[in-house]
Every structure is written in structure tokens, then in C-alpha cells.
Amino acid sequence: MSINLDIAALREEYAAYRAKNLKLNMARGIPCTDQVDLSQPMLSTMLTAEDCHTEGGVDCRTYAAALFDGIPEAKDFFAQTYGIPRDYIIVGGNSSLNMMYDSVARAMLYGVVDSPAPWGRRELKFLCPVPGYDRHFKITQSLGIGMIPVDMDERGPDMDTVERLVKEDASIVGMWCVPKYSNPSGVVYSPETVRRLASMETAAPDFRIFWDNAYGVHDLYEPVELTDIFKACENAGNPNRVFYFASTSKISFPGAGVAIMAASPENLKQIKSVLSVQTIGADKLNQLRHVRYFRDADGVWAQMQRHAAILRPKFDIVLDTFARELTGIAEWGSPRGGYFISLNVPNGCAKRVYTLMKEAGVTITEAGATYPYGHDPRDSNLRIAPTYPTCAELQQAINVLCVCVKLAAAEKECQ
Amino acid sequence: MSINLDIAALREEYAAYRAKNLKLNMARGIPCTDQVDLSQPMLSTMLTAEDCHTEGGVDCRTYAAALFDGIPEAKDFFAQTYGIPRDYIIVGGNSSLNMMYDSVARAMLYGVVDSPAPWGRRELKFLCPVPGYDRHFKITQSLGIGMIPVDMDERGPDMDTVERLVKEDASIVGMWCVPKYSNPSGVVYSPETVRRLASMETAAPDFRIFWDNAYGVHDLYEPVELTDIFKACENAGNPNRVFYFASTSKISFPGAGVAIMAASPENLKQIKSVLSVQTIGADKLNQLRHVRYFRDADGVWAQMQRHAAILRPKFDIVLDTFARELTGIAEWGSPRGGYFISLNVPNGCAKRVYTLMKEAGVTITEAGATYPYGHDPRDSNLRIAPTYPTCAELQQAINVLCVCVKLAAAEKECQ
């Protein structure tokens, strides 16, 4: 490390922060109150007694088993918003994570299209681009599926490694991807990466990409387009390769929005045969509420602009402070959207930084969480979630963070 | 059969109904529009910008992973409404059926407390009291679990048979029960039946009763009390035997209400360890909306009185017409609550009645649906769902039904 770190001065600075008895939590990517306030009218003015019906006349206040996969206007809305085929869409409940878990569990119990047998009857592994999303990794871990980390670069997962692994190992049946503003790196998969994912040869006949487009419309600056994975897969002759997920959690209300999954017609036929046994359908009133409020993709775009206006200053605080304080010591991404900034501190320092932060009253995402089994082999990556705190709180938390990073680095140099 | 049926006259009568080109659907137990109108204010007046917080101050418009099993006031509300321990409750999404499916699927993948291995690794069977609920049977069928029908009598399932089977066959790991106003018979399990279910010896160490209390507060006349299954199980030394389910689907909005499951603390610990991976939590806003609207068990009671006032005349139409037209030809229940009337037509006639009805433009629940695999060995049972049509439509449909029953019976006598 080329920077000269004065450990005594850093210890003093750190002690001063500890003395402040801070209590800040930036562990999760949670929209702030100003953001959820944006959608408040949705809760009271969308549904009247005369007006709880779909365009086709179905009363959303009661069962309609024929619409178990979503009301027609919600399918239109999501197709337009995400630029995916309308007939690929299943509109679900309040959680895309739940749809992902259910999709893996369903594959365990029944298999997927092209499966020789239910996944649960064979040894299974998933590729896990790292750093990645801890809740993805917990799904595969919970279901006893092995996980192979694959490093991310600025174009997405290291495709040479991905291609080699899926070609030689038939037990690799799946891969977690957050293709746009990846959690936590902020990377957008390049067109070439998407094309290679769609066309690569897999030893498993039933390999599935779990395409979690959680931040598909969450641009902070100019809109960035993600290459169409469905089209790429179709062009490559692998039309059934992708299970696609998204939700309005960070558009309307986190945990009270509307989630979707999307997949090819052949996949959908198999999925619906199980889904229609699992449920009479998701909450149609909440679907209607969302469609009425946002109207169309333009309505979403306008809302996302308002979100971005709230979030940009927060991302700026983090990035400006890092540039000022951590240049030459750590490395970080400069995301153009999404909810996170990925910070790589010197190897062997991430856990120490997490602990120092915690002892100073600032909770960040646990070190290691961005890796399968919570194990970061370099002990280097930290996920910064700047959205929830106020700007003042955030500035304070990031100031503490920078001191902690420098102190941990200095301690390590002393060893 | 002691009744003299004039087949020529019946054919004429049936032809006259056919000529009317009726189009009536009473296939499912769906509340009518007047019923869903009762809860309309819930949709617009419950949640204001200043008031989307739990009593504990949690903003229900955003994530709160700590409340993934429900907001505290919803737990209180359901505990009081159903008379079950607050700490046994998980508040879920919009569908108790989904919670049931997930509970069986979870057992398949992970087992339950006391399981030697995940259920998916052994041969499995469920006891299915018949006539019963087709969507229960479809869950077990979908998951490849064998089903053994057990006849119902006026006290619930035939307990001599149940006790014998579960004692001798270790592959019987579960049993579907709708203990109050059973679907479709309307039977309420007797205290003795509940006690025997709770205390019977089972060969499987991990036997579970799936206690679907779908009609727990759905009295049409005086309130009927169901014996407390949790207390009975605890008293019998089998505290983990029951998975309990209920929902507001037929209290507020079918498919847009709030569902719960309940189980012993030991069960809950195991379930939550998986559930917390599956989801960040159900829609807390809808929980808050419901609690605000109903306030407490008294609020539910008042609402159920209004539902009953709408439904009683419909049940009367069916029962009065049956008494007038089918006495001596068929048998039926006289439920004191719930959503169905079970009709047993002469053996070998149910499918014929269904077809005759369909050809006359009246769709009823398919013959056989009340039995596992859709197979009614006596071809006798039909489920009558009188709630959705208007009284005039219902009277007409039941008139047609009575002619069809008599015609099918007469045809059979002629054979």
C-alpha cells in the first residue's frame, strides 16, 4: 500500500467517533421514507366500490381462478415496463424472492422442462457470481444445493470461467444473476456477456439462469439498456434457459408491491401446472392498485426519476467521500443505478472493518455476506447500502467507515 | 327406491329447462357481490400517509424482516378471532391454500419436527376424509403423496378407521381436515373426534394433521364452538401434531384477504427457519388494513352476522326445495354454517346429474371432485355451493337440479 497511514491518529479519530454513541443502520437496501411517500396515493384513492374490476369485468375483490397468473392489465403493464413478452409473465404476490425460492423448490420437487428427474434426486450446484446477493445464496444453501463462486468484472460474471464450468459439470443446474445494477457491484451485464450466457453449452440439459432483474428500471442517471435475455436465448436455440424475476418493491412499496416471474411458454406451461395447485392466485386488488396508479411504463419512468432525485445525492456522498479518503487504499464501484456500492478494502480487512463499524454504532451489511456461505476468501468485500439513512446520517456513517477502513488497513500493515 | 318417478314427465320437464338456455355457475364456494361489498371501506379509508405504522412504530410500507411472520397486531387479532395461542401464529399472504401447499412442500424438502428424513425420501400417504375439499386432494396428488379416503359421518371422519390406519401404517404422515362446517358436508367435528385425533397412536413419528379451519367463524345461525385442537394435542402429549390454517378470504375479500397458519412453538421454529429464507415477509399493509377495519373478534363477529343474513335465505332455498322435491330419493346435510351443502344422489347417478345439469346450462362442482383423484366409488356425492348466485338464480338452478336428480334416478331404475 502506497499510502502512509498514521495508526495513532486513526485510533484517536476512531475513538472520537465511538464517543458519539452513534446508532445508524445501513445494513440492507431499503428505500427511505421520502421514497415510499411517493406512492402514498396508491393506498387510498385507487379502488372504489364502483371500480374494483378488471377491464374485462372481473371483480378483483373475489376469487377468479382463471386469473391465477395475474390480471390482464398487470401483465400488459409489466410487459411494457420491462420490455418482455406479455405471454411470458406470471404476476405473483408481494415478493420476487418468494417466487425465486418457489421456483428452485418447484424444480427440486418436480424438475423443470427438460429435466430427466426432479432436481431433488441428484447432486446439484449453482454458479454464484460474486460479490452477489446474500438472499439468493441462502435459498440455494437452504435447499442443499452446492454453490460455486465466480468472480464479477465490469462486464458481469467472468464468462470464460462460467462457460468452462457449465460445459464440464452436469451437476451445475443453475446460476444466480442480477444483470442490471448488480447487487452489490452495480455492474450492468454487457451485451456480450448476455449473449454468451444465452448461447453457452451446458452439460446439464435443464440448466436455468435465475435472472433477477430487481433493478431493471432503477437508473440513477441516464437510462441504461440491458440486452434482452429472452431474445438472446431464443436466437441461440435455448429458449427455455431463463427464469426472469422482477418486482415493484423498490418502485412502490418494499414488501407490499407486486412481483412477477417470466419464462418461455414451455417453461410457463410446466410452472403453471404446479402453481394452479399451489394457489387460487395472488392478490388481484394490489395488482389493480398498482396498474391504476402507475398506468404504464411512462408512469413508472416518471416515478423512478423522483426516486433517483432522492437517491443521487446519497450515492454522491459515498462516492465523493471514498474518493477523498480512500483513494489508493480501497476500491469501489461507481454504479449508475441500483441500490448499492461495492467496496473492496485491503485483503483480510473486511471483517475487521465490519466489527470496528459495529462497535462505533454503525451497522453495515455483514462482511462475507456477498459470498456463498458468508465466506469471502479475500475477506475484502463490503456492501454499502446508502439509500435508507438521511444525507446527514449517511455522511456521518461514511466518515466513520473511511476511518475504520484506514484503521483496519493500518493495523494490518503493523502485523 | 320407494318413490314413483315418471320418466316421461321428467324428460319433458328437463327439456323445458333446457329450452330456457340457462347460464348459471355454482361450481365454487364464492361469496356473492353483496358479501364483498360489506368490506369495501377497507380499501380506501384504512391507510393514510400518517398512519401506515404498527403500534410499535414500524412502517408497513417498507421491509421489516423482523416482522416476516406478521405484524404484532395481526397476530393479536387472529389469536383472538380463532381462540388460538398468539405465539403459535404466522401471518401469511392472501391464501391459506398456498400456506398449506407450502407446508406440505416444505415437509417434502426438509421434513417436519420429529422427521427421520425429508418426507420426499420415503413413501407417503395422507388420510382424506370424504367427501372433502378437492383443492386439498390436488396438493397431495401433485406432490405424489398417496391418498386414502375415510368416510365422514355426522361427528367427523370415521375415527375407528382413522385410528386403525395411522396405527398400522407408518407411511401415513398426514391427514386433511376441515373441522368446522366441513367442505362439503357441513359437519362440525365432535369434541370426541377432536380428542381422538389428538391422542391417537400413529406409526409415523412425524404425523401431521392439516387442520384447515376455513369456516371457523362462518356460522349461519347460533355460534358453534369447535373443540380446541391445540389444547387437546397438548393434553394428549402430542403438542406438535397439528398445522392449523385459516384466512379472511370469506370474511373480507376472497383472494385478497389475509391467511394464517398456526403450530406449536417447536413446529414454528423449524418452519420459520425455512420461511425466513423463502420470503422477507407477507404484505404488511394488507395486514394493517384488515386489523384497522375489523379491530377485533367482535368486529369479525359483527361482519359474519351480516354475511349470514345474506347467506341464510340461500341455504333455505336449497334445503326447502330438496325437502319438497328429493325426500326419499336423495340425502343431504343441513349445515349450520360454512359454504356448502353435500348432496348424495342414488349410487351411480352423480356423474349423470352433473352432465344433465351442464347440458341444461347450470355448472355445478364436478361429480367426483369431493374424492381423491376425482373418484367417488359410489358415484353419489355432489357439492352444492349456494352462495354466489342471486336467490332467483339459485332457486332456478336448484329446481333444475332436482329434476336432473329425479331424471337420473329414473333412468337408472329403467336400466
Image (cartoon, coloured by chain):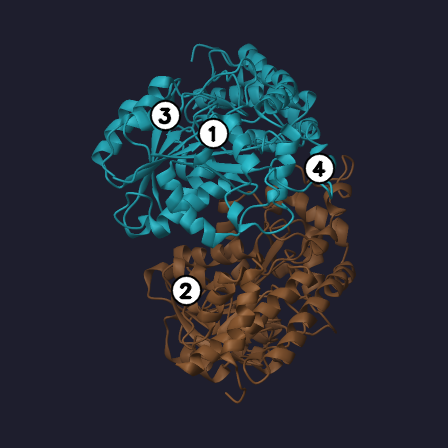
Chain colours: A brown, B cyan
- Which residue is under mark 3? B231
Image quadrant assignment for residue B192: top left
Q: Residue at x 43, y 46 (%)?
A: B272
Q: Nearer the viewer, mark 1 or mark 3?
A: 3
Residue A26 higher or lower than B399, as above or below: below
In the image, is B217 to the left or to the right of B231? right
Which amino acid type is marked by label 2?
Ser
Marks 4/3 in contact by CB < 8 Å: the verdict is no
Amino acid identity at mark 1: Asn
- The quadrant of the image that shows the N terminus of chain B is top left
Q: Quadrant of residue B10?
A: top right
Sequence order check: which comes first, mark 1 or mark 3?
1
Cα separation between marks 1 and 3: 15 Å
Contact between labelled residues 3 and 2, with CB atoms less than 8 Å apart: no
Residue annotated with mark 1: B213
B380 horizontally vs A335: left or right: left
Residue A11 vs residue B177, the one in the foreground: A11
Asked if labels 1 and 2 share a chain, the reply is no
Q: How far separated are the C-alphas under marks 2 and 4?
A: 44 Å
Q: Which residue is mark 4?
A: B43
Lower sequence index among marks 4 and 3:
4
Secondary structure beneath dot 2 equals loop
1 and 2 marks in contact (CB < 8 Å): no
